[in-house]
Image (spheres, rainbow, N blue to C red):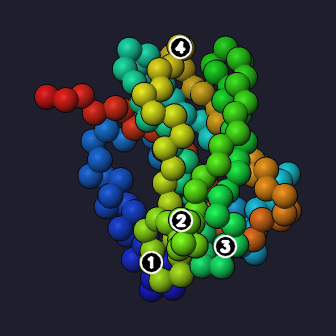
Amino acid sequence: MRNLLLVAIASVMMMSCDENRVFSEHQDLSPQLEWKKEDSRSFKVPIENTEIAYNLSVSFRYITGYQFKVLNVQITEISPSGKEVVKDYGLKIRNEAGEYLGEAGGDIWDSEHLIEPNKKYEEKGTYTYKLTHIMPQDPLNFGMDIGVILDKVAVAK
């Protein structure tokens, strides 16, 4: 429990220090530490500026014991006008040596995966992102939460 509290405090501190962060939300998967395919997660991301570029990332919190090297997710982006774009991504969880990637806090790992660098939005308004795992195993074990992060691309001064 102490490690979980330390990870939560560190995460809040890191988020508050990042002036380019536009959106960051994480949602629990289940108390049983599993993610079922039918349990997709949706995130509402407000876009106010279409003139700048953003970095879109997905975060995944998991526990030691996660058995795959990659987490395959399907992300549906729905624009304010209703246009849907569906893409599949492979989030690397382990390196070639089988070691977990991300920030560790005891047996809890926080990983952040840049999926769309320099993304430009066409419309102002609220975009919806729907995340679903597309792994062969269902439910997917040892997952704690999934999230969406949006940062403004830093401009060189």
Residue 124 place in picture, x, y as percent: 51, 16
Label located before the other in sequence (1 or 3): 3
Residue holding disc 2: 95
Mark 4 vs mark 3, foreground winner is 3
Do residues under tags 4 and 3 come within 8 Å of each other at their CB atoms?
A: no
Label located before the other in sequence (4 or 2): 2
Label located before the other in sequence (2 or 1): 2
Residue holding disc 1: 105
Do residues under tags 3 and 2 come within 8 Å of each other at their CB atoms?
A: no
- The secondary element bearing badge 4 is classed as loop
Mark 2 is on which residue type?
Answer: Asn
Residue 131 visible within the image: no
- Which of the 4 image quadrants contains residue 139? bottom right
Mark 3 vs mark 2, foreground winner is 2
Mark 4 vs mark 2, foreground winner is 2
Mark 2 vs mark 1, foreground winner is 2
Label located before the other in sequence (4 or 1): 1
Label located before the other in sequence (3 or 2): 3
Residue holding disc 3: 66
Which residue is situated farthest in the front direction here? 96
